[in-house]
Image (cartoon, helix red, strand yellow):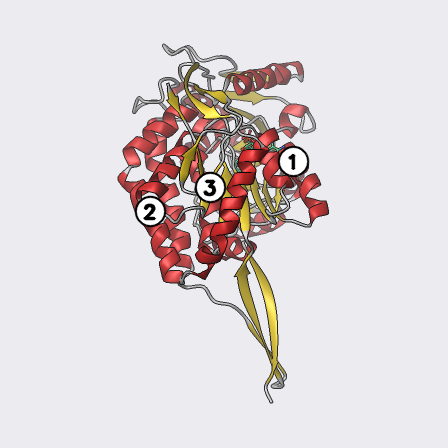
């Protein structure tokens, strides 16, 4: 059975403790590889390697750093088929999705930040002609990057790339649920001669490896994407150590459909925003609000289309939904469907395990109607192929629904009235608003949420600023 190894100081190493964890293929439900059950001593070795590599990596010219990263980007593209296959097997997502979105984006993340630093600039403040202040942005040191399982290589590289491009060295931990493409990335670094110790990847459990990274005094900056509860734990540890923190957390995103929208477009995209990646994208719209005049028509057509979505073997081209990521997550999603029924919801379609010829964890895309706003199903993140749908009458009413959860990551509006779109978008308490589209991700734009969806922003200059410390230097002009 394949054994994944840690990548520390440019070497592939077994964990110091010698233990390994089982890694499952969600489509078959069986163990297919093993990953290091690393501990604080492995993190210590990775931090030491990253510290030792920092002076030389941060001293490279921008062109040199950029070139190293472009080499990684190119090799990811050359190994696209293999990486997509691995991502699909590890995560359960459709192969076509990994091939079309996840892996190309991982390559793009490296390319985007490798080239962004070639166009970077900083500020200068002239104090009344008497002094000049200029802002020097310097790398911080060893950055800790912790990522989740839903878009494994996509989100892993989304953090690592800006950290490296800004001149930091990195200790990174992928999710223990989907470690494979991070391991393949370490092979790629080795193949292209990426400098040793600059990127170190430690595999294992969050409570051991992630916690050791967060607690480590020589990791002054942490970029985390994952659940809100984990984010709270990390913040509790990091705050008294005054670490710089970026937290990208959960969501319960509203999808608002006004009666003057292009109904066909709204239907088509809502299918995607509800069920892409089995609904396991933090940006998925899990609460659909439809204006009363078109509610019946939208609901009928939407449910018809959902029933046509094929669930099954992620390797087949016509499959729309693959497996959900783990048995624990499968149980959690089904328990939320039961809860929705107890709370008075009517299941319009789906609502149970999907009937496939595979032995893994598949759930039918599910639409639930008739739930009050305040119920747990409408308030808590389910993170699976489950959406609720309900009618509304006025803008004011739907805004109160949309803003009525503890989360504030993303929202979507469907309307042909541009004035209304601007007005509603400005009043939504989310970090991202899509109007008549969904998941358009320009890498230059600020990405992140408000309230319990997180703190800070990733993307573009925001990410490069996060991974650097601004220093003001003041000089008299005479
Ligand atoms: P998770 O919080 O369980 O795990 C995320 C990562 O944190 C994993 O690598 C895990 O091992 C690690 N971790 C766990 N406990 C830790 C600890 N005590 N200290 C340090 N690290 C620890 O999340 P998940 O289940 O992997 O991912 C799903 C969640 O991620 C959902 O809530 C989803 O909304 C969120 N998410 C958010 C975004 C975003 O950009 N806002 C993107 C994707 C996913």
Residue count near mark 1 (Cα–Cα under 10 Å), binned few <14, some 14–19, many ≥20: some
Tell me the element at label 3.
strand
Residue 312 in percent (x, y) is at 38, 17
Residue count near mark 3 (Cα–Cα under 10 Å), binned few <14, some 14–19, many ≥20: many
Residue topped by disc 2: 193
Q: CA distance from mark 1 to mark 3?
A: 44 Å
Disc sitting over residue 401 in the figure: 1
Please state, as top left, top right, bottom left or bottom right, where the C terminus lies in the image. bottom right
- Tags 3 and 2 touching, CB below 8 Å: no
The residue that appears at 44% across and 55% down in the rendered structure is 57
Residue topped by disc 3: 200
Q: Nearer the viewer, residue 66 or 440?
A: 66
Which mark is nearer the camera, 1 or 3? 3
Residue 315 left/right relative to 249? left
In which image quadrant can residue 97 be found?
top left
Mark 1 vs mark 3: which is more N-terminal? 3
Name the residue furthest right. Answer: 240
The residue that appears at 63% across and 24% down in the rendered structure is 377
Q: CA distance from mark 2 to mark 1?
A: 52 Å
In which image quadrant can residue 269 be found?
top left
Q: How many marks?
A: 3
Mark 3 vs mark 2: which is more N-terminal? 2
Mark 2 vs mark 1: which is more N-terminal? 2
């Amino acid at each position: 059975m394949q054994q994944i190894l840690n990548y520390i100081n440019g070497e592939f190493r077994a964990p110091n403790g010698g233990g390994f964890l089982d890694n499952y293929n969600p489509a078959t439900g069986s163990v297919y590889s093993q990953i290091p059950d690393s501990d604080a001593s492995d993190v210590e070795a990775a931090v030491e390697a990253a510290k030792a590599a920092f002076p030389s990596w941060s001293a490279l010219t921008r062109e040199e750093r950029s070139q190293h990263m472009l080499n990684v980007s190119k090799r990811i593209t050359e190994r696209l088929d293999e990486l997509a296959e691995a991502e699909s097997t590890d995560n359960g997502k459709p192969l076509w999705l990994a091939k079309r979105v996840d892996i190309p984006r991982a390559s793009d993340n490296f390319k985007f930040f490798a080239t962004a630093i070639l166009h970077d600039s900083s500020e200068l403040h002239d104090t009344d002609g008497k002094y000049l202040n200029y802002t020097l942005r310097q790398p911080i040191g060893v950055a800790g990057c912790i990522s989740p399982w839903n878009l494994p290589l996509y989100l892993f590289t989304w953090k690592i790339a800006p950290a490296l491009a800004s001149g930091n060295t990195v200790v990174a931990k992928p999710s223990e649920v989907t470690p494979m493409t991070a391991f393949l990335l370490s092979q790629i670094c080795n193949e292209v001669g990426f400098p040793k110790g600059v990127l170190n990847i430690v595999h294992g459990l969050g409570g051991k490896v992630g916690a050791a990274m967060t607690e480590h005094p020589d990791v002054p900056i942490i970029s985390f994407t994952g659940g809100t509860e984990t984010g709270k734990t990390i913040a509790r540890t990091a705050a008294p150590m005054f670490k710089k923190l970026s937290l990208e957390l959960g969501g319960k995103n509203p999808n608002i459909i006004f009666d003057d929208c292009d109904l066909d477009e709204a239907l088509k995209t809502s299918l995607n925003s509800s069920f892409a990646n089995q609904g396991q994208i933090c940006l998925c719209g899990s609460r659909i609000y439809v204006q009363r005049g078109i509610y019946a028509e939208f609901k009928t057509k939407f449910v018809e289309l959902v029933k046509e979505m094929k669930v099954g073997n992620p390797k087949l081209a016509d499959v729309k939904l693959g497996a959900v990521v783990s048995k624990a997550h499968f149980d959690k999603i089904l328990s939320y469907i039961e809860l929705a029924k107890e709370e008075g919801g009517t299941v319009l379609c789906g609502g149970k395990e999907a009937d496939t010829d595979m032995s893994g964890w598949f759930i039918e895309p599910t639409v639930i109607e008739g739930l009050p706003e305040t119920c747990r199903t409408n308030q808590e993140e389910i993170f699976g192929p489950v959406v609720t749908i309900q009618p509304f009458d006025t803008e004011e009413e739907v805004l109160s629904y949309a803003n009525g959860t503890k989360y504030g990551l993303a929202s979507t509006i469907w309307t042909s009235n541009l004035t209304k779109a601007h007005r509603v978008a400005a009043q939504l308490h989310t970090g991202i608003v899509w109007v008549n589209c969904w998941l358009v991700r320009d890498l230059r734009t600020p990405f992140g949420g408000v309230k319990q969806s997180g703190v800070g922003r990733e993307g573009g200059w925001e990410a490069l600023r996060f991974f650097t410390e601004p220093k003001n230097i003041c000089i008299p002009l005479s």
